[in-house]
Image (cartoon, rainbow, N blue to C red):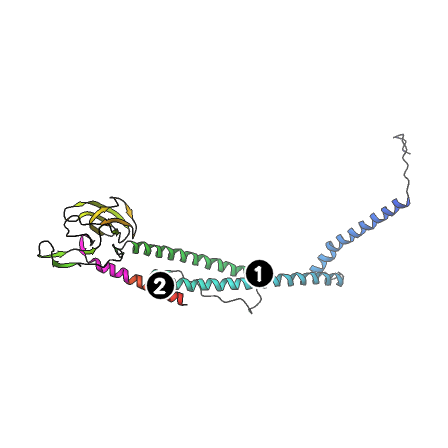
């Protein structure tokens, strides 16, 4: 009875309530024991306190051993993977050095690595710090290989572009050159005269192809050359295509190697349908056959290389 509240409260204790209260008390004691164990005994076992029960120390030691075993197994697996990655990086390095020759670069033109490598099998046990250091080395090597491949790609692309700008493509497909470059008897006057290019005889309307990529700088009718196209290939290199029946490009057009630019005819100073093909370097006439022969030799070398690669 509480006289201040002027009310009464009755509490009835049954057997079930007493049982539940006992279970709650036991559970609380268990939780308290676990907390005391982890807060005192486990800490003391790790700190090697003299008064700690040896059984607690053994339990903590077993747990630490199990964790070490798990970490060691994972570190060994990661180490093997790192070794495989390192071997692949070294393989890429040797491959890059071989490609250097194709790009016309010397091995001294690229940054050198320290030469370390090998698969990490059967070596000493690696720590987490050593494994991290090896991963850093691999990242650095991968960056160097990436830079090298970028340089090689740029150099090979530059070589390919330069090759496409050299007039080695036959201007008339499947037709051998007729009258060559040099002094000859002029077919109209009958006197000795310098022939400044190559003649390709073919039927009127036969396609005339660009010997290399470039920019059309002239498309006009010339009294001697007839319908004429001139293409500038850069580096003061120019090709001229004369006597066409009609031209298919205009001044300022960008043409690619092998593109049809005109059709064979007999306009201007001509005795019959043919293409008069000239190559000029710095305004000086050159023998076009030298360029075409170089292109044929290069094509034969590439075909032989493909055949050898297919034979492997």
Q: Position of residue 14 (x, y in %)?
A: 91, 43
Estimate the x, y position of residue 48 in percent, counting from the top left: 70, 61
Residue 4: x and y in percent read 88, 30
Task: Tell me the quadrant of the picture where the C terminus can be found.
Answer: bottom left
* Residue 84 visible: yes
In the image, residue 196 above or below residue 246 = below
In depth, the one of 309 and 117 nearer the eye is: 309
Left or right: 191 in relation to 299? left
SS type, badge 2: helix
CA–CA distance between discs 2 and 1?
Answer: 40 Å
The answer to whether residue 281 shows anywhere in this view is: no
Label 1, residues with CA under 10 Å away: few <14, some 14-19, many ≥20: few
**Is residue 256 on the magenta stretch?**
no
Q: Nearer the viewer, residue 280 or 244?
A: 244
The magenta-colored residue range is: 281-296
Which residue is at 54% across, 59% downward?
132
The residue indicated by pointer 2 is 101
Mark 1, residue position: 128
Q: Nearer the viewer, mark 2 or mark 1?
A: 2
Identified at 47% across, 62% down, the residue is 89
Q: Earlier in the sequence, mark 2 or mark 1?
A: 2
On residue 196, the disc is: none
Query: Left or right: where does residue 127 sit relative to residue 157?
Result: right
Q: Is residue 39 above or below residue 83?
A: above
Residue in view at x 38 percent, y 62 percent = 99
């Amino acid at each position: 009875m509480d006289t201040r509240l002027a009310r009464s409260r009755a509490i009835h204790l049954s057997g079930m309530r007493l049982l539940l209260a006992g279970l709650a008390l036991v559970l609380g004691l268990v939780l308290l024991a676990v907390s005391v164990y982890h807060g005192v005994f486990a800490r003391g076992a790790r700190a090697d306190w003299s008064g700690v029960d040896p059984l607690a120390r053994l339990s903590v030691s077993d747990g630490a051993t199990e964790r070490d075993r798990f970490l060691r197994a994972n570190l060994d697996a990661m180490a093997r993977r790192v070794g495989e990655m390192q071997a692949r990086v070294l393989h890429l390095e040797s491959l890059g050095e071989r490609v250097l020759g194709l790009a016309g670069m010397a091995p001294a033109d690229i940054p050198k690595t320290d030469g370390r490598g090998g698969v990490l099998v059967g070596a000493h046990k690696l720590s987490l710090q050593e494994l991290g250091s090896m991963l850093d080395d691999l990242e650095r090597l991968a960056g160097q290989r990436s830079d090298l491949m970028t340089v090689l790609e740029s150099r090979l692309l530059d070589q390919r572009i330069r090759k496409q700008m050299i007039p080695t493509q036959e201007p008339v497909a499947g037709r051998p050159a007729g009258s060559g470059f040099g002094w000859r008897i002029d077919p109209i006057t009958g006197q000795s005269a310098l022939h400044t290019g190559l003649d390709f005889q073919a039927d009127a309307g036969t396609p005339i192809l660009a010997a290399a990529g470039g920019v059309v700088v002239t498309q006009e009718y010339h009294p001697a050359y007839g319908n004429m196209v001139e293409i500038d290939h850069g580096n003061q290199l120019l090709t001229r295509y004369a006597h066409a029946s009609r031209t298919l490009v205009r001044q300022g057009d960008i043409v690619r190697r092998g593109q049809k630019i005109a059709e064979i005819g007999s306009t201007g100073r001509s005795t019959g349908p043919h293409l008069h093909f000239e190559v000029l370097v710095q305004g000086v006439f050159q023998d076009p056959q030298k360029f075409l022969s170089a292109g044929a030799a290069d094509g034969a070398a590439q075909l032989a290389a493909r055949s050898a690669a297919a034979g492997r």
